[in-house]
Image: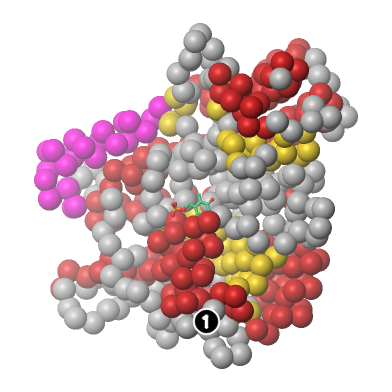
C-alpha cells in the first residue's frame, strides 16, 4: 500500500473524499474522557448505537402501552409477523433468498439448533472439522454436540491450524484435510472471519471442497456479517449463524440470524428441536398437537421473538440497506489498508500484524502482536482509545467503515507510537 504516506494531511484528505463519511453522524460515539474524544475501534466486539435506534424501540413501547396484547395484530408493525420485515434486508446482507434467513434467538442457541438438524453423525462419518482456536462458545457447542451423540472430542474433533510460524490457515491445507479425511467428516464448521487473527476464510472455495467430500458445511459469521461480502446461497452453504451486536450495530445481546439453504427448506426427515413459532403460520393458533414446520429458515424458530431487540435491529438494517455492503466493503478495504500502511511504516520494529495482508482474506480488523502490549493497551485507554486486548500479546483494532474515519486510524497509530516511545 505504498500510495499512503504518514502525513496527517493525507488522513484529512481521505476523510474528505470518503463517500460514506456522513454516516458517522448517525451514530452515538462514546463520550469524551478528560477532554479527549473517543477513538472507537471495537466494532468487532460491540457496534455503536445508531441514533435512530431509540425511535424504533420507542415506537414499540408506545404500541404496547396503547394496545396491550392487540399489538400482535394492530401495532404499526404487527408483532405477530414482526421478524418478517427483516427478511429481505437480512437476505441481502448475507447473499441469500428471504426464505433462507430468519432472525431469532442468539448466536450460540442458533448454532445448537442447526447442529441438531445438520450434524448427523454415523459410525463411519462422525467428525467435526473446526478451526483451531475457534471462539470459545463454538468450541463448547461443538464438543457438547459430539458428546451428546456419544463421540469423544479427542477423536472426533479435527482442528485446522496454521503452519508453524504462520498465523493464518492456508486454504490448500484445508483442502488437503478434506481430501484425506473428508469421508469421516460429517460437518465442517468454521468462523467466516476468525475472531482472533482476523483471517477471512475463502468460503466459496472451501465450501466447494467440503461438499465434494460429502461434508455438511456450516459457518459462524459473527465476525463476517456486516463486515465482508457474503453469497451464502450461491456458494451452496448448508447453514450459517451470526450475531447482530458486532458489525451489525443491533445493540448488546441483540437478536441473532440464521441461514438454511433452500435445498433443505422442505425436508421433513431432518430432525429438529421444534417450537410453536416454527409451526405453519396458518394453523399455529389452532394449537394442534402435531408440528408442521414452516418451509424454509423460519421453520427453525422456537419461541415468539422479543420485539424490542428486533426493533433495534431494524434501525441498523435500514442503515445497511442505505449504505449497501459493496460501498461499505470498498471503504473498509481502503481504511484498513491505510491503517496497515501506517503501522508498517511507523511501528514495524515492535508490531507484527497477524491478519493476512491480502484484502480478500480479511475484513476490517487487524490483529497486532505487540511487544509490551498490555502496557501499551493501558496507555491507549488513558487516551480514550477503545480497542481490544487478548492475552498474551494481541491488540485487535477494527475500524468499522460505517463510523470510523481515516483520522481515527491516524490518531490511533499516533497514540500507540507515543505510548511505545514513552515505555
Ligand atoms: C461473538 C461470538 C459469539 C457469541 O455468541 P453469543 O451466543 O452471541 O454469546 C459466538 N461465536 C463467535 C465466533 C463470536 O465471534
Label 1, on which residue?
A: 151
In this view, which residue lies farthest toward the right? 2
Which secondary structure dominates the residues rendered in magenta? helix
Q: Quadrant of residue 124?
A: bottom right
One can see residue 325 in this view: no
CB at mark 1 closer than 8 A to ligand 1? no
Residue occupying the point 48% across, 23% down: 29
Residue occupying the point 73% across, 75% down: 178
Quadrant of image for the C terminus: top right
Residue 254 placement, left or right of 221: left
Question: Looking at the image, which is closer to me, 69 or 31?
Answer: 31
One can see residue 66 in this view: yes
Q: Position of residue 80 (x, y in %)?
A: 24, 56
Was residue 190 drawn as part of the magenta stretch in this picture?
no
Report the number of numbered marks.
1
Question: Looking at the image, which is closer to me, 206 or 327?
Answer: 206
Question: Looking at the image, which is closer to me, 146 or 121?
Answer: 146
Was residue 55 drawn as part of the magenta stretch in this picture?
yes
Magenta-tinted stretch: 51-74
Amino acid at each position: 500500500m505504498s500510495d499512503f504516506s504518514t502525513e496527517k494531511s493525507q488522513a484529512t484528505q481521505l476523510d474528505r473524499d470518503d463517500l460514506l463519511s456522513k454516516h458517522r453522524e448517525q451514530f452515538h460515539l462514546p463520550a469524551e474522557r478528560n477532554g479527549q474524544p473517543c477513538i472507537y475501534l471495537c466494532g468487532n466486539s460491540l457496534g455503536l448505537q445508531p441514533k435512530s435506534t431509540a425511535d424504533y424501540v420507542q415506537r414499540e413501547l408506545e404500541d404496547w402501552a396503547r394496545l396491550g396484547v392487540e399489538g400482535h395484530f394492530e401495532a404499526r408493525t404487527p408483532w405477530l409477523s414482526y421478524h418478517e420485515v427483516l427478511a429481505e434486508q437480512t437476505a441481502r446482507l448475507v447473499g441469500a433468498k428471504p426464505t433462507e434467513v430468519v432472525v431469532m434467538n442468539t448466536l450460540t442457541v442458533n448454532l445448537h439448533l442447526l447442529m441438531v438438524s445438520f450434524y448427523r453423525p454415523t459410525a463411519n462419518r462422525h467428525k467435526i472439522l473446526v478451526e483451531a482456536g475457534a471462539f470459545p462458545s463454538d468450541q463448547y457447542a461443538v464438543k457438547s454436540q459430539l458428546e451428546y451423540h456419544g463421540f469423544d472430542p479427542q477423536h472426533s474433533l479435527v482442528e485446522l491450524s496454521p503452519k508453524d510460524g504462520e498465523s493464518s490457515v492456508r486454504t490448500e491445507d484445508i483442502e488437503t484435510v478434506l481430501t484425506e479425511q473428508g469421508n469421516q467428516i460429517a460437518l465442517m464448521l468454521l468462523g467466516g472471519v476468525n475472531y482472533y487473527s482476523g483471517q477471512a476464510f475463502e468460503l466459496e472455495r472451501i465450501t466447494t471442497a467440503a461438499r465434494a467430500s460429502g461434508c455438511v458445511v456450516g459457518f459462524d459469521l459473527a465476525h463476517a456479517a456486516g463486515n465482508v461480502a457474503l453469497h451464502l446461497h450461491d456458494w451452496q452453504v448448508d447453514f450459517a449463524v451470526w450475531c447482530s451486536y458486532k458489525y451489525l450495530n443491533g445493540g448488546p445481546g441483540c437478536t441473532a440470524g440464521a441461514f438454511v439453504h433452500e435445498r433443505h427448506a422442505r425436508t421433513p426427515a431432518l430432525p429438529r428441536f421444534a417450537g410453536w413459532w416454527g409451526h405453519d403460520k396458518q394453523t399455529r393458533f389452532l394449537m394442534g398437537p402435531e408440528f408442521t414446520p414452516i418451509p424454509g429458515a423460519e421453520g427453525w424458530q422456537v419461541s415468539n421473538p422479543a420485539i424490542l431487540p428486533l426493533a433495534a435491529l431494524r434501525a441498523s438494517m435500514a442503515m445497511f440497506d442505505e449504505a449497501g455492503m459493496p460501498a461499505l466493503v470498498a471503504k473498509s478495504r481502503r481504511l484498513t489498508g491505510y491503517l496497515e500502511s501506517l503501522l508498517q511504516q511507523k511501528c514495524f520494529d515492535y508490531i507484527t500484524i497477524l491478519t493476512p495482508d491480502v484484502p480478500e482474506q480479511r475484513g476490517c480488523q487487524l490483529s497486532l502482536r505487540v511487544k509490551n502490549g498490555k502496557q501499551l493497551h493501558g496507555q491507549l485507554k488513558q487516551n480514550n482509545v477503545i480497542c481490544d486486548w487478548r492475552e498474551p500479546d494481541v491488540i485487535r483494532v477494527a475500524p468499522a467503515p460505517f463510523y470510523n474515519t481515516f483520522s481515527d486510524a491516524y490518531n490511533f497509530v499516533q497514540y500507540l507510537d507515543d505510548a511505545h516511545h514513552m515505555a
